[in-house]
Every structure is written in C-alpha cells, then in structure tokens.
Amino acid sequence: MSMILRLALIGFGNVGQEFSRLLLSKQEWLSERKELDVQVVAISTKTRGSLLSDKPLDLKRILRIRESGKDLAEYGPGFSDFSALEIIRKSQSDIVAELTTLDIESGQPAIDHIRTAMQAGINVVTANKGPLAYAYDELKTLATRKGVQFRFEGTIMDGTPIFSLVERTLPGCAVTGLTGTLNSTSNLILTRMSEGKTMEEALEEAKKRGITEEDPSMDIDGWDASAKITVLANVLMNAKSNPKNVQREGIRDIKLEEVRRAAESGKKIRLIAKAQQLNGVVKTSVRPELIGTESPFWSVDGTSSALTLQTDLMNEITIIESNPTIAQTAYAIFSDMLLISEGLRAHS
Amino acid sequence: MSMILRLALIGFGNVGQEFSRLLLSKQEWLSERKELDVQVVAISTKTRGSLLSDKPLDLKRILRIRESGKDLAEYGPGFSDFSALEIIRKSQSDIVAELTTLDIESGQPAIDHIRTAMQAGINVVTANKGPLAYAYDELKTLATRKGVQFRFEGTIMDGTPIFSLVERTLPGCAVTGLTGTLNSTSNLILTRMSEGKTMEEALEEAKKRGITEEDPSMDIDGWDASAKITVLANVLMNAKSNPKNVQREGIRDIKLEEVRRAAESGKKIRLIAKAQQLNGVVKTSVRPELIGTESPFWSVDGTSSALTLQTDLMNEITIIESNPTIAQTAYAIFSDMLLISEGLRAHS
C-alpha cells in the first residue's frame, strides 16, 4: 500500500536544498522499501518567492534554478508571493519542514510557522533550535491537542539520534543529567588554539567553512550551546527552561596561553554544556572547562560533537558525532520524515 | 486498555534474577504508564527445577527462595522437572526470555530454546550471543515466517542501544563498517597493565568481579569479541558469518613491556574488533591494536565498551557504555520486552 506524503518546505537555503538532493537520491528506495511517494508541494523562501502546487513540484528543476542563483519565479506555474504562513495554510501538506534560519533572541519566525502548521493539523519537522528553546512546552501541548507529530532531531548534533534514541530505544529509562560539547565553532577554535593558532585565525577558518556567522557572538559567547542544552533539558528532562536561564560563559576570553598551560598539564579546554537536577529543579550551564584523558570528550576535536546522557537504569551513555557536514542535517530532516510516516501509517 | 504480557524465563541465574528485581520495581510504572500487566508464568533452571503455572508466579517469593540458595521445589505449586523445551512448549507465554549461559562452540542449548519458542509462535528476547553468532539467519527467517518478534539488545554492550539504534532511529542509513572495543575483561586487563599490574593480577581482579570465567580463554583469546563482532556484522551488515570466520588474535601474549612502550609513545593497546566490507564480502577481525588520543576509544577504560558505526549518510557515530553492571544486562531484557509489547499492540 503505497502512501503519498506531501511536504511543504519552509525555507530553502543550504539545508532545504541539501535535503531536496537527498530526497531525490532516495526516491527509488522510498518507493520500493518504504512504499512512500514523497511529493514536495510547496516551497517558501524569504526573498526568492514561493511555489505552491496541488501536483508534485519538479524538485530537480527547482534545485537547478536555485543553484544558478535565480528566483523561484523562473519555475513558472505555482509561483506566488504568498508569505510563509499563507503557504503553510494553503499547502494541504502532510508535513511542514521548518528550515528557516534561527533568531536566537526569540525563536521567531519559526515558532509562528510551527504553530500555524499544527493548528492546521499538519505534522512538523524542524532543524531549528529556536522554537524548542523558547516554546517547547506550548508546541508539544499543541501537537498533542491537534494529534500531529513534532520531530526535531536536527536541532542537536545534526542527524545523530538523541531524541529518538531516548524516545525509541530507552523505554522506561529516565535521563537524570546531561553533559555535552555541542558547539562546533567553539570546539574547532579550541582545537586550533591547542595547535598554536590564535582565536582570530581559527575564527577565520570557521567563517570560511560557513559554520559561524560574520558576527560570531552566537558561538563564542555560548549562546548556541545555551540554546542546545535548553532544548535537551526541556525535551529530555522536562526542564521548562529557556536559554536566558542558562548560567552562560563562552570561550571569547580564552587566551592562547591558557590553552597552552592546559596542554602542559595533560588537559584540554572545552566548552561544556550541562543540565543537572538539583532539588527538583533542572539547572543548566555552559562554560569552558578543563577535561582530562579520562573524559569521553577527549577525542572530540574540530567540528565534532558529543553528548553524555546520565540515566537511572543505564548509567552513562555517550554518543559522538564525527565531522558533520550539512548532509547530516539533511539526514535529520529525512529520518524525522520517515519516523512521522511510520506514525501516520500506524494510525491510518 | 491494559494488556497482559506473559513471560517464560529460561534460565534464572544472575541475569534472570536481576531482571526479575527490575520487573518488580517497575510494576507500577508498567501498569500506569504502559498499561502493561507483566506476569511471569514459567521459570526454567538447569539444576534447580522449574516452575510452570497458568496464574502469575509470585516473583518476590521465588527471588527469596533462590537468594537463600534453595531449589524451586520450595515454591510448591507448579514445581516440575520439565526440561526447558517442555516448559517453553507448555508455557502459553507471549515472550520467552532466553537467559541461559553461552556455549561459544555451538550456541547451544540456546538455539534450540529459541527455535522451539518461535515454532510455538512465541516472541523471543535473549541476552545470549551464541544463537546470533551461529544461527542468526535461520532464526530471523523463522521469526518472520512465524510472525513473532526477536530482540537481542543485551548480546552486545548490555542494554546500550545498538540494534534498536540502527533499526529504530537511523532509517534509510546503511551501516558500512564497524569498529569496537567489546570485551570487558580484555579492556580491564589492558587498563590495569597500563597502571603497572601484570596480566595475572588483572585476571585475578576480573575473576573476583565475576566478569571472566575460571578459564579466561573466551576473553583473552578473543572469542567473546569474535562472537560479538559476528553478531553485529550478521545483524547490521548482513554478513552471514560465524565466529570461526573471524581473523582472531587475543591479548594473551601481550607483555607488560609492550604496554609500557605504547604508553611512552602516547598510545594505548586495545583489543579492537572490526567488520569491513571488502569486494562485497564482510570481513571480520579481532586483534590488539595501538590507538592514539584521537581515537574515540581513548577514554574507554576498565570494563567500559564502545562501538563506532561507519555509515553512508551519517559518517561515523560512536556510542560508549560506561562501567556496566548486571543491572544494564537486565535493562536490555526489560527494554526488549517493552519494544515487543509495542509491536504486539500495533498488531492487535
């Protein structure tokens, strides 16, 4: 029984395009192995126009258009200047993939996109931390009330299973604490500094590789890691927190000399994010810490990330992601889409 | 809608008893959160007799009886000298938990137990490597034909999600290679040797802690690691292999001097198990290797284990289990039981 799955892509930047390429490359597999006919029926961009169709859009052609730098108007049929919210409401999609860029101050406009989709009874997948950091409880409650699925694996460590790991493979096992090195840019900078480079040189590399912004404050002041530990604490430990509650210290003031001294005493400096239960309240923190060779994060260099789950029944489990690229973020959307399709099938 | 789940425990040694304790401690949670009424209706032991009942057995009393070293005859009603196979056939259980000890040469008698359960239409969970290493293909095919579920998370790294990780959280992502440090005893010995202890002293500790047998050949000759990499390769890479195909070298001949020399050059010796695809064939090996600080296994000391999955869409994912005890093996059975109950509900 083949199932049609209609997608609306809200945001069509690097992640949206990479996801589209993955989708095209997996079309046969989806059809043969999963009996899924995935159709993109809507695409919304911030400045390049939008496409809305009741038939499947030609994703290959759209990718060619965007890769050559042209607007979606070039596509022809279905082109409009509808807003993202209008596209979501009109799209008759089964899944909205929220792929816009993050506003760390507010989580917007992604929160509005997700809220609108859920209110219209549409399932949501996102790789956007903002909504989870600022509005997880509201969105989770709304999803339950509307009977839609909400998945967000890509928000932390790209497609590395963290949320689905706890939800789908550790039944009855409670997460009691979290320790992670979650910000690629900080980890890359600290790695390069231990190789003798200055922070400025390392930042230059991070900018060139497209993993940090022109203003790197998000990364080196610990905001990105704060958003991530908040998302983890909210989802896995029911923390009901937000990034502004995180006791936060970034790596901006770390001196080359400190990194050198750490190395001399057999240590590394790493930006460590933590969530801990203290007297019934979940406390979150992000700060540079010294780690030793006994730490599971010792080998986590460059842009890699790692997370240790402290649990009640399984002691500590650590999961490490090595050298991610945008392909892994695209896989997060892809795997979330597949898990949603399983859920849809179970309830059909 | 509360669901009754009837279990037959084949084997009631350390793992069976620890699982029973976990079950008792989770009874309320199972009932309230999972709407599950788990009833143990049969227990088979090798030398202490068996119990078979159509009503739930009093697990608390049975634990007290075994903890005081007495035979199951002490329990009274339901006591018999039925063989394990008879118990399985007569038990009318929904799940057989195969918890006997491993015969690494043949995988028996566990294979017969599992085969008999499946033929009777009973779902199976096991923590026993043997059947997976020697008869995975046959048992998987039989399970499919009989429409029963077959889970075995506890065979590798205790309850750490490996099989369920790939199956339930990495859809469409293929495992292309495996690298692990999977044998606790070897890892503990190598750790102690790097602290200056001799292999004999370290082995003594392992025996005292109950993690190796009187004859430690299984561990220090690499058989345990060979069985484990075979299971992983069979399940995750469709290798159709068995432990005798593994290119195997244990740690028996490692000298203290070699460990010392490794440390002087900033390395550690670890027993590394690998599965790799070469010209369409999966090759498996177990051998002592030098690892450096860049290895994700660098921090994996003592009885901890770790596995790196090489994949097509997610690069490398490493998962580390820290300092497991028998409680984590018990959790493997518990979580497998819960995943089977989900499957039963979906098909009811």
Image (cartoon, coloured by chain):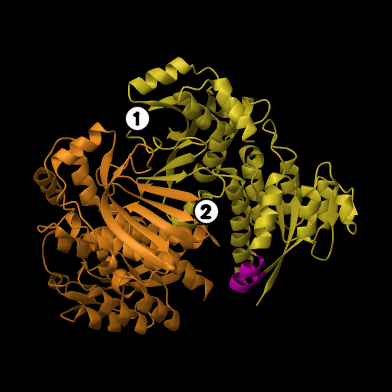
Chain colours: A yellow, B orange
Residue A108 at x, y = what percent? 73, 37
Q: Residue A164, labelled with which disc?
A: 2
Residue A132 at x, y = what percent? 62, 42
Q: Chain of mark 2?
A: A
Q: Residues within 10 Å of mark 1 (few under 14, many from 20)?
A: some
Quarter of the image where one finds residue B190: top left
Q: Residue at x 14, y 50 (%)?
A: B253
Q: Is residue A205 visible?
A: yes
Q: Earlier in the sequence, mark 1 or mark 2?
A: 2
Closer mark to the observer between disc 1 and disc 2? 1
Residue B148 at x, y = what percent? 42, 77
Q: Residue at x 67, y 51 (%)?
A: A18
Please determine whether, in this image, residue B260 is positioned above or below residue B146.
Answer: above
Q: Is residue A46 left or right of residue B93?
A: right
Q: Residue at x 58, y 21 (%)?
A: A200
Please determine whether, in this image, residue B94 is positioned above or below residue B200.
Answer: below
- What kind of residue is marked 1? Gly
Say which residue label 1 marks.
Answer: A292
- Which stretch appears magenta? A27-36
What whole-number distance in Å separates the C-alpha atoms at marks 1 and 2?
A: 30 Å
Q: Residue B133, labelled with which disc?
A: none
Q: Is residue A197 left or right of residue B24?
A: right
Give yes or no for contact between labels 1 and 2 (Cβ–Cβ under 8 Å): no
Q: Was residue A34 drawn as part of the magenta stretch in this picture?
A: yes
Dot 1: element: loop
Q: Chain of mark 1?
A: A
Residue B315 at x, y = what percent? 50, 51
Residue under disc 1 on the same chain as residue under disc 2:
yes
